Amino acid sequence: MSPKPKTPAESLRLACRANTHTTSTSLLAPTIQANLLVLPTRYAPSFRALCARNPVSCPLLWTTPPGTATTPLAAGADLRTDLPKYNIYVDGVLQSPRGVLDIREEWSGDHVGFLIGCSYSFETALERAGLPPKHTLCVPARTVPMFRTTVPLCPAGVFTGGVMVVSMRAYPAGRVEEVRDITRRFGRQHGEPVAWGWEGAERLGIAEKVRGGKVDFGEWVEVGEGEVPVFWGCGVTPQVAVMESRIEGVVLSHFPGCMFVSDVPAEDEAGLESVIKILDVAEEVCGGGED
């Protein structure tokens, strides 16, 4: 009997592990995708508090025990190898501007991994509604444009001075309400947009960057005639918080656009919630948050 065919999510994770897929994961599997941040254990309480206080930017899906690189969101997956690329920070300074292919050597027994919801999760729903994000239509597909805003995060513990990062997708002005309705139900995956239109860009403090196509992360995709920019919370926000806080030690993360692809269907927020309940166990690790 031949082996059971692997799902798109499993196949993608194995391709990442083999270093044969090293680029964006947008639209490559109809399952929940997640940002990754890996911190020394002493910072875990502060980060859980940061997520609790900034749930749109940092919707927390899972926390690993110290030194453990697995998650019930995908049986058999290894968070150290199963993403296309990673970033490494030392004392808050990025060491890998082009990314690295795995973080097995860097992930120590004193590291705790956090998975945070990602807006890539709802892109399949947008595509099915005839609203595919423009970065997915480029040849080759591009990484979604991301911008560092001037909107401050609510600080927590060692994480002070951080700001919200947003991802941008352009849509015809007359379809923004439809886009909002579709993405609203993905609450653990950044949910509906935080702003839209040029007035929204002004409120976020990024209008000049958007008009000039000057992304902070990802790749530029133009806003066409009759279109307006639409902005969602983005899971790169924690990486900016790490850089702003200059916390000591080795911090690991996903490379922007290169997500962890889970086995949980993107539309299954109820199933996701049942997994998240297991996070009660992680309270022993993180101490329930920090001021």
Image (cartoon, rainbow, N blue to C red):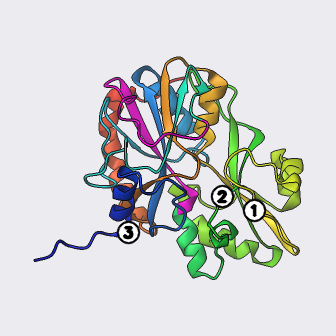
| Residue type highlighted by circle 3 | Pro
Residue 144 has which mark? 2
Real-space Cα separation, disc 1 to disc 2, in angstroms: 8 Å
Question: What residue do we see at 31% from left, 46% from top?
Answer: 278
Disc 1 packing (10 Å; few <14; some 14–19; many ≥20): many
Residue 209 has which mark? none
The majority secondary structure of the magenta stretch comes to loop
Q: Are marks 1 and 2 in contact (CB under 8 Å)?
A: yes
Is 99 colored magenta in this rendering? yes
Real-space Cα separation, disc 3 to disc 1, in angstroms: 26 Å
Give the mark nearer the N terminus: 2 vs 3.
3
Look at the picture and state if 195 lies above or below 70.
below
Asked whether residue 139 is in view, the answer is yes
Segment colored magenta: 97-120
Tell me if 170 is positioned left or right of 144 in this view: right
Question: What residue do we see at 58% from left, 37% from top?
Answer: 238
Give the percent coordinates (x, y) of residue 148: 73, 42
Question: What residue do we see at 76% from left, 42% from top?
Answer: 149
Q: Are marks 2 and 3 in contact (CB under 8 Å)?
A: no
| Residue type highlighted by circle 1 | Val
For the N terminus, which image quadrant? bottom left
Residue 8 has which mark? 3
Is 274 colored magenta in this rendering? no
Q: Which residue is mark 1?
A: 221
Q: Nearer the viewer, residue 237 or 78?
A: 78
